[in-house]
Amino acid sequence: MSPLSSASVLTSVAADSTVTAAVSTTSALPAPAPSPSAEGRMAPTQRDIPRVLAIAGSDPSGGAGIQADLKSIAANGGYGMAAVTALTAQNTLGVSAVHVPPAEFLTAQLTAVSDDIAVDAVKIGMLGDEKVIAAVRSWLEKVRPGVVVLDPVMVATSGDRLLQESAEAALRALLPLADLITPNLAELGMLLGEPEAASWSDALEQGKRLAAETGATILVKGGHLDGADCPDALVNTGGVLSADVVVVDGERVPTNNSHGTGCSLSSAMATVQARLGDWELSLRTVKPWLEEALRTSGQLEVGRGNGPVHHFHHLPTGSLAVAAPGSADGSFADLLHAEAAADLEEIYGLGFIRGLAEGTLPESEFAYYLAQDAIYLNGYSRVLARASALAPTEAEQLFWARSAQQCLEVESELHRSWLSTRTVQPELGPVTKAYVDHLLAASASGSYAVLVAAVLPCFWLYAEVGETLHAEFLAAGAPEGHPYAEWLRTYADEDFAAATRKAIGIADSAGFAASEAERGHMLTAFRQSCRYEVEFFDAPRRHG
């Protein structure tokens, strides 16, 4: 099955032999449409390397504040800039002193940046007092950046207060100028003048109230709650999101090294939103990156208290790897292709594929296939978002992120244009569940190389099968009466072929750089995904 296949997907004939319409997508992987912006604000534009300005306090220990912001921006593919609102004396044990320079100097910093450099996104953190808030407000109203993320820093993770009580009203008045607000649970309650939420459901209700009051999207974070799960949610009651509450599940990472997580999350969201233009996809991209930053934080060995997260966990370390074993020229991709040969031959002989090619496939089997594909794409998109978070280069991050977005678009269109008109119920089938579970396990391994190998067959085998079926269709004269003619024509899409070549190249490079042991894990993951591709194509027959 294809995550990105350009499709004018016209499904099979109904019982009366009429053709039913369906899915239109593109695998040219365009940048998503900009999110709605406030009146007068610069229209947000997507950039491969967004220019992101952090307006926040300084942390000399490097774990929080602008130091964390700049690391987070760079780790997520942006160019970071910083205007300092406050100087702190702090380390992993806590904050011992705070100095707030004159607000006029902050204004001078902000003006110097925006007079010379286009600012694609702004992350606002610690503001300190009313004069600082007024300076930031004045600058925002003048410059109107396309993306504004406000992390209402009021209390540090250590419990130290970082905003004067007299400035709370001014901070609340600043909130409507933000697109996204990212309070922790204590700050969420303080902004509403309510007690801190004691449960996830209470936190979501507070998020709804703050969203209604401000008009902004609220990122409700579950990190301070108890339990093995650690969900986050985007909340907006104004129709900006696909639903009023969009929950992104996650795993709680057991670690004491959480210094600067709020700073890192908010600056990453500003950066990725400026790249992708979609808050939901941005959170699905940032969350696994931050989880891994927490999971690998112990490698840093910084401080005796609440240590920082590992922003650059996805970058390679150690010595240069030798060429991977494979064909005579050392191509790891050739080795993978040889591994898939038997599975490809088996796919070509399946009744589903032959029936699709010959026009004899029962509509019920094709309906089951499409329903399972829609379910699969939802899970596959999460896995690709994880690949984006682990990717070592900005180009690969962007490729996987856009691929993830395309999966969600295709899934949504399948439901809207085809599945909604049919009686078939898209319930999770056993093969689909096993395949997605396998991919999720690969994504949880923490190995970018293994994950890339696991997701590759969905590109590669589908592209090869599609190319063969399209060639057979043309050789038969491309008969218009063929019930799957429009579906078969989509297999000629060059954009999907280009995306497949890109995915193959990424896997080849990852295999080249991997250790011998990791290459073995890559092969195992790739082989298993190939088998699931065979079973997925055969599942409609067995289901019927």
Image: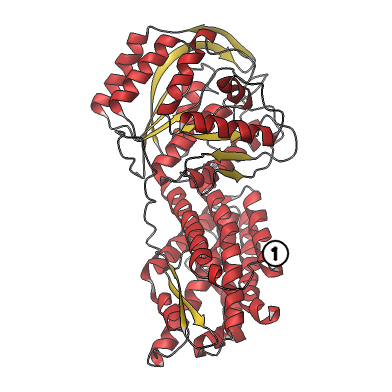
* Residue 135 in sight here: yes
Taking 303 as reference, is 395 left or right? Answer: left
Q: How is the image coloured?
A: secondary structure
Residue found at the very far right of the displayed protein: 227
Residue found at the very far left of the displayed protein: 115
Taking 254 as reference, is 331 left or right? Answer: left
Does residue 99 lie above or below 218 as drawn? above
In this view of the protein, which residue sits in the foreground, 530 or 407?
A: 407
Measuring from the top left, give residue 178's x and y in whole percent: 43, 30
Measuring from the top left, give residue 213's x and y in whole percent: 50, 29
Taking 274 as reference, is 309 left or right? Answer: right
At 39% from the left and 40% from the top, the residue drawn is 274
At 52% from the left and 62% from the top, the residue drawn is 411
For mark 1, give the secondary structure.
helix
Does residue 27 lie above or below 69 as drawn? below
**Image quarter of residue 287:** top right
Q: How many marks?
A: 1
**Are there few (<14), some (14-19), or many (20+) residues within 10 Å of tag 1?**
some
Q: Amino acid at mark 1?
A: Ala
* Residue 327 in sight here: no
**Image quarter of residue 42:** top left
Give the residue pinned by disc 1. Answer: 434
At 57% from the left and 35% from the top, the residue drawn is 208
In this view of the protein, which residue sits in the foreground, 414 or 453?
A: 414
Name the quadrant of the C terminus. Answer: bottom right
Measuring from the top left, give residue 144's x and y in whole percent: 31, 29
Name the quadrant of the N terminus. Answer: bottom right
In this view of the protein, which residue sits in the foreground, 211 or 498?
A: 211
At 52% from the left and 52% from the top, the residue drawn is 513
Does residue 138 lie above or below 375 as drawn? above
Measuring from the top left, give residue 376's x and y in whole percent: 60, 63
